[in-house]
Amino acid sequence: MSMAATTGEAKLTVLGPAAAAPEPKEEEEATHGHDGVGTRSQWLRAAVLGASDGLVSTAALMLGIGAARPADALAVLLSGLAGLVAGACSMAIGEYVSVHAQLDVELAELEKRRRGGPAGLQLHAAAVSRPGQAAASSALSFAAGAAVPLLAAWLVASYRVRVVVVVATASLALAAFGALGALLARAPGGRAGLRAVVGGLVAMAATYGVMKLFRTHGV
């Protein structure tokens, strides 16, 4: 319903409730569509961060064991494999516990809204966290990142060449992961990739240096 009153050049238009208020269905669909895109972006960023964690920790672990026992290639490879399995399990368990706690809060909030909210309130299952899915995603992303330096080292027999290959491979992968994570967050990817590489190199150098001291002093 609308009414128009004109006095000279002035025109006043009064809109009724039906014209002024947006359609609830359209507003709801737009809101849930935006939430879906945001949720997918968060999942992708979490996967990229998990892969970066697996990459850095496994590469640093292998370099550290290699510094302490440079002649034992099998020990280096086994340490990388153990790091992959342990890290993936740790990420999965931690993510499951964390997301399950978040799920409990969400379910309590939804139940509260269902009891005291307006009539016709719809509860969407897509908005509820999934602990199992989060745990599997974290484990797989960590394992994927950890597999990069592990596979690179597996193909090299020489100790010195192995160190160069692991560091180079890890640096390139970290640059890609850092840039991708920044782009998913709509931020510049170049600086983020550089920060990821620098941080990874610091972690690898620290682990290598500490383990080198153990070998030098015969501990």
Image: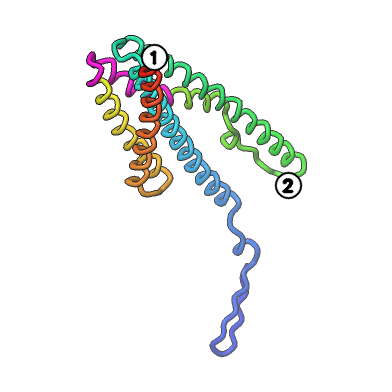
Q: Position of residue 125 (x, y in %)?
A: 60, 33
In the rendered structure, are the residues bearing label 2 and label 1 in contact, judged by CB atoms less than 8 Å apart?
no
Depicted 82 relative to depicted 132: above or below = above
Residue 145 seen from this side: no
The earlier-in-sequence mark between 2 and 1 is 2
Q: Position of residue 36 (x, y in %)?
A: 50, 41
Q: Position of residue 116 (x, y in %)?
A: 77, 43
Q: Circle 1: is it few (<14), some (14-19), or many (20+) Cα within 10 Å?
A: few
Residue visible at 60% across and 79% down? Answer: 12
Q: Quadrant of residue 64?
A: top left
Give the structural element (helix, strand or loop) at label 2: loop
Amino acid identity at mark 2? Pro
List the residue tagged with mark 1.
218
Q: What residue range appears in magenta?
A: 142-161
Q: In the rendered structure, find residue 118 and report the number of the disc placed on it.
A: 2
Please tell me whether the stretch drawn in magenta is mainly helix, strand or loop.
helix
Q: Position of residue 26 (x, y in %)?
A: 55, 51
Residue 167 seen from this side: yes
Q: Residue furthest bottom?
A: 8
Looking at the figure, which quarter contains the N terminus? bottom right
Depicted 203 relative to depicted 63: above or below = below
Q: Circle 2: is it few (<14), some (14-19), or many (20+) Cα within 10 Å?
A: few
Q: Quadrant of residue 84?
A: top left
Q: Residue furthest right?
A: 116
Residue visible at 56% across and 22% down? Answer: 93
Residue 177 lies in magenta, yes or no?
no
Residue in front for this viewpoint, 53 or 164: 164
Residue visible at 31% across and 10% down? Answer: 72
Give the structural element (helix, strand or loop) at label 1: loop
